[in-house]
Image: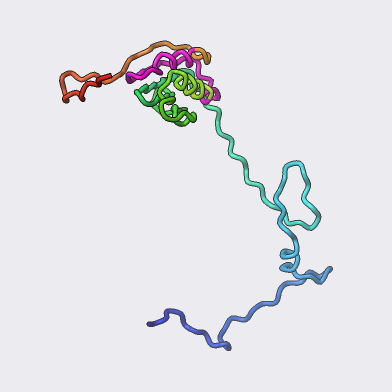
């Protein structure tokens, strides 16, 4: 096995320079720097004497984006209800589902769970100052109407309610009918 590193003879090594000493105190700059503890900067509190100053990073401020019109997509299946609100370009601003809200099992598919999901999404979009929404409902679940009612009671003005459930025009063979 061949080694890539070459050993430099002691007489050929670069000379180490002595630390620069301060004329007044006789201490070297390296000693002062090592002795000074780094203390995180706290707003409104002056750093302790002898402490090395810590540079504060400039805080990034997220621009307050105002979206006045949006589209609410409600997907109500037999097992779950999902609500997402997007702007008119299609970028999702907020979303939630029954499972995310903590409902498990058969309680995920209830109308109460759909109401809670819609209220959560309405709370999430409050920083955007949205005033009116278009609602697109998809699926056969029991949370369809209750989710729409919850969005309306949250202070959003609903302009249009569309049912966008996919309906086949005699395309693929339908699944087996449920016997209840």
Q: Is residue 59 left or right of residue 35?
A: left
User: Which residue is nearer to you in this view: 3 or 72?
Assistant: 72
User: Which residue is nearer to you in this view: 153 or 15?
Assistant: 153
User: Which residue is nearer to you in this view: 11 or 171?
Assistant: 171
User: Which residue is nearer to you in this view: 22 or 151?
Assistant: 151
Residue at left offset 66%, top offset 47% = 56
Image quadrant assignment for residue 61: top right
**Does the image show residue 93?**
no
Residue at left offset 28%, top offset 19% = 180
Q: Magenta segment: does it hold 131?
A: yes
Residue at left offset 34%, top offset 23% = 78
Q: Residue 166 at what x, y percent from top left? A: 26, 20
Q: Is residue 59 left or right of residue 102?
A: right
Q: Residue 109 at what x, y percent from top left? A: 40, 23
When the figure is inspected, residue 82 is found, relative to residue 160, above or below; the finding is below
How many labels were placed on the picture? 0
Work out which quarter of the rendered image holds the N terminus and state it.
bottom left
């Amino acid at each position: 096995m061949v080694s890539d590193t070459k050993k430099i003879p002691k007489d050929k090594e670069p000379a180490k320079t002595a630390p620069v000493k301060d004329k007044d105190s006789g201490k070297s700059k390296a000693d002062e720097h090592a002795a000074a503890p780094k203390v995180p900067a706290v707003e409104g509190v002056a750093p302790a004497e002898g402490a090395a100053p810590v540079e504060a990073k400039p805080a990034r401020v997220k621009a307050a984006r105002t979206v006045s019109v949006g589209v609410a997509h409600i997907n109500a299946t037999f097992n779950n209800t999902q609500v997402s609100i997007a702007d008119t370009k299609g970028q999702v601003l907020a979303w939630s589902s029954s499972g995310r809200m903590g409902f498990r099992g058969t309680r995920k598919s209830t109308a109460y769970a759909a109401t809670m999901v819609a209220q959560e999404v309405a709370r999430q979009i409050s920083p955007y100052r949205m005033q009116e929404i278009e609602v697109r409902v998809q699926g056969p679940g029991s949370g369809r109407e209750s989710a729409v009612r919850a969005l309306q009671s949250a202070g959003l003005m609903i302009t249009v309610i569309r049912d966008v459930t996919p309906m086949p025009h005699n395309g693929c063979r339908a699944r087996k009918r449920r016997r209840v």
